[in-house]
Amino acid sequence: MPCSPQEIGSLFLFEKLSPEQLGRLCGEGRVEKFEPGPVYTEGEPATCFYVMIEGTVVLSRRVGGDDVEVSRTSQRGVYSGSMQAYLGDRVPQVYNNSMRVTEPTRFFVLPADTFAGFMQEWFPMAVHLLEGLFFGTKSTQRAIGQRERLLALGSLSAGLTHELNNPAAAAVRATASLRERVGKMRHKLRVISTSSFSPETLANLIDIQERTAERAAKAPVLSPLEASDREDALTDWLDDHDIPEGWRIAPTFVQAGLDIDWLDHVAAAVDEDLLPSAIGWLNYTVETELLMDEIDDSTTRISHLVDAAKQYSQLDRAPYQVADVHELLDSTLLMLSGKIGQRIKVVKEYDRTVPKIPAYPAELNQVWTNLIDNAVHAINGAGGEGTLTVRTALDHDRLLVEFRDTGPGVPKEIRGRIFDPFFTTKPVGEGTGLGLDISWRIVVNKHHGTLQVESEPGDTRFQVLLPLTAAESDISSEESV
C-alpha cells in the first residue's frame, strides 16, 4: 500500500523526525494491510519492525501449553517485532511474542536491518545508552544469579554439615565406648576362663550370650511407662540375686529386650557364686550390641545424607531424564532441614500414583529450594512457627507440585510483580529478587510448565504444573546431544 510521510509522521514514534527522515522511512519501508489472523509467531526469526497505523492488535506469550494474552490495543503508533535489531548479531533476533490482529489492520513495516541502520545513524548516543542498559542488565542479572546460587549452596552446605555432624559425632562416641566395652569384655572373659566354670556351664553361657545378642537385635520399642516398670522389676531381681550396680545394668537389659524370665534362664545355667560374673559378661555383650547398632544407625544416616546430596545435585545423572518428583522433593527437604528448623512442621501430601516425568532434575531442585526458602522466610516473619505442606497430584494432563505455607501471605498489590527480576520483599542484603524469576524461567521456559501463586493471610500456595510428556523440542535436543 502507498506510504505517506505525512501519515507516518503523525505516529508518536516518528513525530520528531525531519521531512527528509520521514521520506527515507517511506522509501525503505512499506505500509501493509493484514486481515484478521496472525502476523508473526513467537520464536521465529525477527525480520521486521511493525508500527500500527490503524486497527487492533493482540500480543500473546506461550506459557506451558497455552497462549496467554499480554496486551490488546487499538492505539495508533504502538510497535512490536524486531525492537532490538540495533544490537545486531550479539543477541539472537527472534520474536519475543506472537502478534495477531482482530480486524483489518494497517502497519508501517520496516525490515530489521534497515531499522537498525536508521537507529545507529540517527540516534547514535541513544543506541549506545540502550546497548549499555541491555547488556548491563544482562550482566548484572547473570552475576546476581550466580551469587544467588552460591548463597543457596552455602546455605545448603551449612545445613548438610549440621545434619552430618550429629550422626558423625554419635558414631565417634559409640566407637570410643565400644572400644572400652570390648576391653572390659576381654578382661571378664579372662576372669571367667580362669574360674571354676565347667566346660558344660561355659558352653551354656556362650550359648546364652549368642541368643542374648540375637534378642538385643530384635528388641521391641517400649513406651516410657513400660520401660520404667520393666527397669524396676529387673533392678529388684538383680538386687535379690546380689548383683552389684543392678540399677545401672537394668536400663541396658531393658533396652535389649531382656526380662525376668530371661534372667531366670541365665541363673539356672550357672552356679550362684558365678552368677555376678555371668551377668556382668552378658551386660558387656548387650552394651556391645547396642553400641554397634548405634554405629550402624549413624553411618546409615550419613550414607543417606550423602545419597540425598547426590540426588539433590544430580552430579552423577544425565541433565535431562525421566525423574521421580518425590525423590527430588525429599532430597531437597532433607538438604534444607537445617534451615527449616524444628519449629516449622513439614507435611507431605504425596500422590504416589503420579508417573515419573521428563525433566531437568537439578534445575527442578533449584525451584523447590527457592519456593521452600520463601515459605520458611514467610513463616519466620510471622513468628517462626507454622506448617509447610508439600503436595503432589495429577491436574488433568499435568503434574501439580504445590508448596503451601501458613505465613502472612503475599499482599495483593505486589502479587503481580513477585516473578519480576530483582523484585524482593526481603530486607536489604537478605534477598536478590531473582529466586522466583529463576524459578519461573526454569518451570516455564525450560519445562514448558506453569508457575502460579494463590495467597491470603495464613494460606499461600505456590503451584508448579509440569507436563507429563516431553515436548518435541526437548526430545530433538536430547537426541542431538
Image (tube, grey):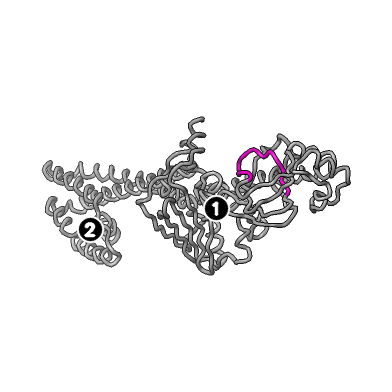
Query: Looking at the rendering, in which quadrant would you find the N terminus?
Result: top right
77 relative to 427 in the view: left or right: right
Q: Position of residue 174 (x, y in %)?
A: 38, 48
Residue 94 rendering spot, x and y as whole percentages: 65, 40
| Extreme residue toward the front, this view | 2
Disc 1 residue type (three-letter): Asn
Could you say whether the residue bearing mark 1 is in a helix, strand or loop?
helix
The residue lying at 25 percent from left, 66 percent from top is: 229
Q: Residue at x 23, y 50 (%)?
A: 282
Magenta stretch encompasses residue 274: no
In which image quadrant can residue 195 be found? top left
Residue ID at (35%, 49%): 294
Image-based side of 194 in relation to 87, left or right: left
* Position in image of residue 255 (x %, y %): 28, 56
Q: Quadrant of residue 392?
A: bottom left
Crowd rating for badge 1 (residues with CA inside 10 Å; few <14, some 14–19, many 20+): many
Looking at the rendered structure, the kind of residue marked 2 is Ile
Residue at 28 percent of width and 64 percent of height: 223
Residue 154 seen anywhere in this rendered image of the structure: no
- Looking at the picture, tell me which residue is in the foreground, 346 or 466: 466
Horizontal side of residue 466 vs 78, given as left or right: left
Residue 243: numbered disc: 2
Q: Label 1: which residue?
A: 370
Q: CA distance from mark 2 to mark 1?
A: 60 Å
Look at the numbered disc 2 and give the secondary structure of its residue. Answer: loop
Mark before the other along the chain sequence, 2 or 1: 2
Which region is colored magenta?
A: 39-51
Which residue lies most toward the top here?
A: 480
Q: Is residue 243 visible?
A: yes
Please tell me whether mark 2 or mark 1 is closer to you in this view: 1
Q: Any magenta on residue 46? A: yes
x and y percentages locating residue 26 in the rendered image: 80, 42
